[in-house]
Amino acid sequence: MLNPEKILGGLLRGRSRRGGMLGTLGAGTIGLGLLGVAMEAAEHYMNKSKTAQSAGVPPAPPAAGPAAPPPPPGASSDGPPPPPAAGRPAAADTSGDAVLLIRAMIAAANADGTMDEEERGRILNRLKEVQLTPEEHAFIVQELLSPCDLDTIVKAVTSPETARQVYAVSLMAIEVDTDAERRYIQGLSRRLGLDADAVSEIQRELGGAPA
């Protein structure tokens, strides 16, 4: 099963423009939203891995409860499912945005056209701690081999919040120390419709100097 939030969290873990931790980000302009979900997913899988290694044995399955009583005479066993519990709204599906942010990070890392096999290997090594499934590994390898272009990234942005997060994770993916990377980041901010104030605030929250 593909869990893009887990992959995104693994990519973000320990990343910022100046080597700080994602936890130093404010909740203002960028908004932790999906980024926080991704980090929680990554930490969950890492902690689960450490627990399994220290225990050495898998946990016992839960004990079976008493059998459900049979339906009353004349009642259908294929009736409609019960309504959801009151006051508990359905969870938002963030998988599409998580995939977009993963692709934005990879596109930024490829901005200068120098993502070679060694760099791809470093990215995959960083993800080992979050225990990728075969499907997740195949997904990230495919994305690394075929990075999205800027047009594809921008067209997939559907809200101002997502635009800010795309810009933020793109900055976190690179050091912006080549002309190609500067052109990419500047072009990205223009295409996303981020004004100078928004760009400056995101950069401050990431703890870096203007790109």
Image (cartoon, helix red, strand yellow):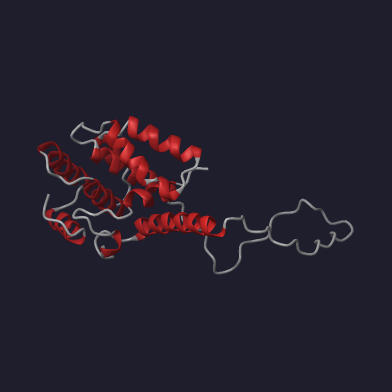
Name the residue nearer the viewer: 141 or 196: 141
Location of residue 75 by image quarter = bottom right
* Residue situated furthest right in the rendering: 73
Residue 43 locus on image (x, y percent): 42, 58
Residue ID at (26%, 58%): 30
Q: Check the image and report above or below for 15 versus 143.
A: below
Residue 1 locus on image (x, y percent): 53, 43
Q: Relative to 68, is 204 on the left or the right?
A: left
Residue ID at (31%, 45%): 157
Q: Check the image and report above or below for 209 versus 114.
A: below
Name the residue nearer the viewer: 48 or 136: 48
Name the residue nearer the viewer: 86 or 48: 48
Residue 7 locus on image (x, y percent): 40, 47
Name the residue nearer the viewer: 87 or 21: 21
Residue 90 locus on image (x, y percent): 52, 59
Residue ID at (31%, 40%): 122
Q: How many circles with numbers are drawn on the protein?
A: 0
